[in-house]
Image (spheres, helix red, strand yellow):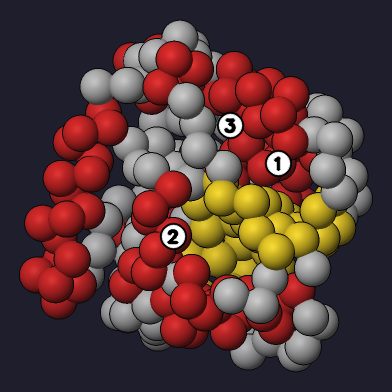
Amino acid sequence: MRLMLLYGVNCTKHIWDYIKPYLRDFDIDYVEYPHDVTLNAKKVVDITEWVYRNYGHHCYDAIIGHSLGGIIALQLIAEYKMNVGKIIYLETNLKPANEFYRNLMTQKNMEKYGDSILQMLREEKEFYTAELLKSFQVDFDYTNLVNDISQDIYAIYGDRGIPEYPAKIQDLNLSAQVLSKLNLVFIHDSCHMIMVENPEQLSEIMKGILLNFCLPR
């Protein structure tokens, strides 16, 4: 089973190192965006175009995208008609979400992983343009991509250590029509960096999706 993994802004492909041991049975392309591409990208589609040029000739059972990578994954299917079986996006906001979703890691995980993750984010930030950052941080709406996709879309988020929080779906600020096209799953004790914070549960959920197991509600 062949997969493509796409990371989020200010990250590198090493963000997947925490979950990589759990996915060793899959054939995975860990995509890395060149700095000369991100330095000139004004919109997400500028990176998507590069990914398609370099990987669009492959057939993937699934594309897995984190944050910005999730938008790229949706664009690859909706706009470039790439041959993909399923889409899994991690902590991707299709519209600006409420405050519940605006944290990087839980306090416990920040103490454990914060130094290395924050260093990576600082080092990579200089390679992204202000225009690109604005395109998915301020007044954005990528919900039209969901409406143009027939494949199964799985949207995975961290539960922020508050699994019973009643408004976690409402706080995504998505219409009922868009929500009806998403398979929502929440990972325990994690926030935006779910592949770092809880790679074991995330990998089990991903395997369930990829191998058509039943998913927990």
Q: Position of residue 95 (x, y in %)?
A: 52, 39
Residue corresponding to mark 2: 16
Q: Earlier in the sequence, mark 1 or mark 3?
A: 1
Q: Which mark is residue 31?
A: none
In screen coordinates, is 7 left or right of 88?
Answer: left
Q: Is residue 16 above or below residue 205?
A: above
Mark 2–mark 1 contact, CB under 8 Å? no
Q: Is residue 155 above or below residue 187?
A: above
Residue at x 82%, y 28% (from the top left corner)? 80
Q: CA distance from mark 2 to mark 1?
A: 20 Å
Q: Earlier in the sequence, mark 3 or mark 2?
A: 2
Residue at x 33%, y 36% (from the top left corner)? 10
Q: CA distance from mark 3 to mark 2?
A: 27 Å
Q: Is residue 93 above or below residue 191?
A: above
Q: CA distance from mark 1 to mark 3?
A: 13 Å
Q: In what element is the residue under mark 3? A: loop
Query: Which amino acid, mark 1?
Result: Leu
Q: Which mark is residue 74?
A: 1
Query: Which amino acid, mark 2?
Result: Trp
The quadrant in which residue 206 appears is: bottom right
Of residue 149 and residue 27, the one placed in the foreground of this image is 27
Residue corresponding to mark 3: 141
